[in-house]
Structures are given as structure tokens and as C-alpha cells.
Image: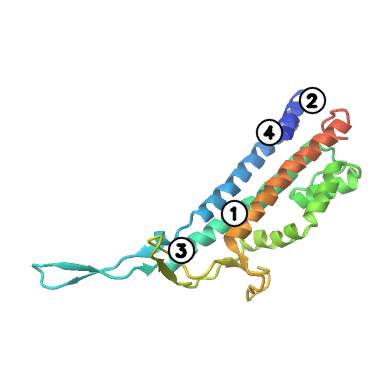
Amino acid sequence: MPAAKQAIQELFKISVSNNDLVYKFNLYDASVTQKLWSTNYYLQRLRSLDVNQYLMYPTTTSGTTSTGEVFVSDPIFDAPRFYYDLNRLLDGFFMNSMSTLDTLGHQIYTLYKCKSNPPKKIYIRTAMGMLTREHTNCKLGHFLSSQLGSRWFLEFEPFRHCTTHESLIKFADPGTVYDDITKSYHLLKKIKLPDDPRSIPFKYTRNRKAIEYCDGLFNKIHSLIDKAYDNILADIRSNSNTIPVP
């Protein structure tokens, strides 16, 4: 656990007695950790996705019934099953990655005083907006503004939204090839994500490889979460350890 996150937990425990606020803080605090873990879970499954798990080996019987000779034909790649699993894992990765940030948004509302009634639906952008309006000098607000306005985040957002509407990867047989060195099959082409999933038909001019992109995105989200807690702790400290931050 990051040191800043642990320090915030300890300060909250000794500073806040409102049962409703304590319940919400504990719920969202644990949920951020859970959803980040879930994001990593789907990433690990994506990394370990092996085309050899989707090869079928049909058998044919030749000769008389008494001899029953069996000949194994070349393997057939079960492309539909592969793409079902691939899209399922990408859906899980993108849904949980954004949910991690949106849950952090909920936690922010328990750590900073909000003059207006919190909206029924809270997202990370909702929390950022509240901070920039009502806590103009807080470090967290400035940090989130820089991150949520950065290129990596603006490119990431559409993937999260589009997973609720369509599959990111087209169902097509990319073909497999046998590697004599590794004694296994691999795909002829790398699986790629579209340039912009909101633009149909998809275009691939950016050559964005799915696994590599998810790897880099997870690192950015993990870093954002850790630095967000650093900034939250700094805001609490600069306000005499008062929680919620006035």
C-alpha cells in the first residue's frame, strides 16, 4: 500500500466520527484498491492469452474397422472462441481501469468539503470539477486537471465508453503460423486497437498494438492513483490535518 494512502486512512480514522462519512470512505477506499487489482487481473489474462489454447485437432479414421487407424490432421484455429475471450478481457480491462478512477472520484467527495449537494452520479471528472470550483488552491485539483487533460487520458476515455456498445476487436481470422524453434503456433499479425473507437469503420493508422497499449495504460493509471493520494495528503497537511479538507 502506498505510504500516502495509509497516512490518509490513519488521519481519517482519528479525525472523522460521522458514521455515514466513515462508511463511505471505507467503502470507496477499499473499492479503489479492488478495482485497480481487477484491472491488473484482466491485464495479466491478456498478457497470457495463448493462441495454442484455441487450436483444434480434428481426427479422421482411415482403413478398416478392425485396424481403426487414426490420422491427426493439421490444427484448425478456433478464431471465434479466441475473439470472444479477447474482447471479454479487453472489456474487463477498460471497464475496471476507468472504474478505478471514478471510484477515486467518490472517495474525493468524502475527503473534501463540498458546498453543493453531491450529484447522484460521480465520476473522476465530476470530482475534478468540484475541486476546481470550490478548492481552487488545492494540489489535487491542479494535478487532476493536468492528467485528465493530457493526451493519454483523452485517448483512453473513448475505449472505456465504447466497450459498453460494441466489440473493440473485429471477428476475423488473422491466421496462425508454426514456429519450429518454440514448437508452438503464433498469430501472423499483432492484434490492434482502432485509432478512435468512436469512428466507424475503425481505422488503424496509428498501429496501436492492443497488449502493449494496455500495458502502458495500466502504468499511467497506477501512477495517477499513487500521485493523487500524495496530493490529497499534501492538501490535508496544509489544512492542519483537517478532514474533510475545508
Disc 4 to disc 2, C-alpha distance: 14 Å
Residue on which disc 1 sits: 93
Q: Amino acid at mark 2?
A: Ser
- 171 vs 163: above or below: below
Q: Amino acid at mark 4?
A: Asn
Residue on which disc 3 sits: 82
Res 26 label? 4
Asked if the residue under mark 1 is in contact with the one under mark 2, i.e. CB atoms within 8 Å, the reply is no
- Using a 10 Å C-alpha cutoff, classify the residue at mark 2 as few (fewer than 14 neighbours), some (14 to 19) or many (20 or more): few
| Mark 4 element type | helix
Which callout, 1 or 4, points at the residue further toward the start of the chain? 4
At x 68%, y 69%, the residue is: 196
Which callout, 1 or 3, points at the residue further toward the start of the chain? 3
Q: Residue furthest left?
A: 66
- Using a 10 Å C-alpha cutoff, classify the residue at mark 3 as few (fewer than 14 neighbours), some (14 to 19) or many (20 or more): some
Place of residue 151 in the rendered image (x, y in percent of width and height, measured from the top left) = 76, 60
Residue on which disc 2 sits: 15
- Using a 10 Å C-alpha cutoff, classify the residue at mark 1 as few (fewer than 14 neighbours), some (14 to 19) or many (20 or more): many
Q: Quadrant of the C terminus?
A: top right
Q: Amino acid at mark 3?
A: Phe
Q: Nearer the viewer, residue 15 or 64?
A: 64
Place of residue 92 in the rendered image (x, y in percent of width and height, measured from the top left) = 57, 54
Which callout, 4 or 2, points at the residue further toward the start of the chain? 2
Q: Nearer the viewer, residue 23 or 210?
A: 210
Q: Amino acid at mark 1?
A: Phe
Q: Quadrant of the N terminus?
A: top right
Disc 3 to disc 4, C-alpha distance: 39 Å
Which callout, 3 or 2, points at the residue further toward the start of the chain? 2
Place of residue 5 in the rendered image (x, y in percent of width and height, measured from the top left) = 72, 34
At x 63%, y 59%, the residue is: 213
Q: Quadrant of residue 183?
A: bottom left
